[in-house]
Image (cartoon, rainbow, N blue to C red):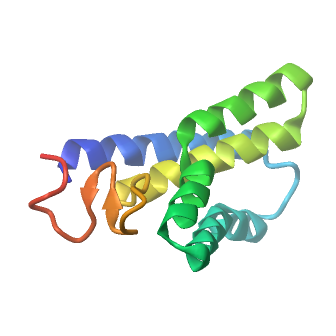
Amino acid sequence: MKTIIKLEEAALTAISIYFLTKYSLGLPVWIWVLLFFSPDLSMLGYLAGNRIGAFTYNLVHHRAIALLIVAVGLLTAGNITIAIGILLFAHSSFDRMFGYGLKHDDDFKHTHLGWMGNEKLAIK
């Protein structure tokens, strides 16, 4: 994957983590570290097959959905909702920084960024 895209995702991750500090809800850092990786539980959908796994993974890792959750939180003054949306956005950007994109339903390693583990087929 191009270095410029990795840098962009790193910047989005860093900015999102900054905003998480503003909506920390008084939780200790160690809980936020656990919560940060919790969206990856959506991979359990792969136990039901590639199609369902890709759907559950993409649902939790889609940044537009994360932004929609943030918007709902802002409209309803729900700090927990805002924090959840920011967390999902930060996690998704973090994953994409390492080449874990949204999944196609034929194979876990086939993402919208290309094939994971094969730099020749990834975004150029």
Toward the left, the furthest residue is 120
Q: Is residue 17 visible?
A: no
Q: Where residue 89 sits in the image (x, y, percent)?
A: 58, 44
Q: Residue at x 42, y 57 (%)?
A: 103
Is residue 11 toward the left or the right of residue 35 in the image? left
- Displayed quadrant of residue 29: bottom right
Q: Where residue 108 sits in the image (x, y, percent)?
A: 40, 69
- Displayed quadrant of residue 36: bottom right
> Observer-nearest residue: 7 or 65?
65
> Observer-nearest residue: 43 or 16?
43
Q: Residue at x 58, y 63 (%)?
A: 52
Toward the bottom, the furthest residue is 47
Q: Where residue 33 sits in the image (x, y, percent)?
A: 67, 67
Q: Residue at x 88, y 53 (%)?
A: 26
Is residue 60 toward the left or the right of residue 2 in the image? right
Toward the top, the furthest residue is 75
Q: Is residue 52 visible?
A: yes
Count numbered badges in the picture: 0
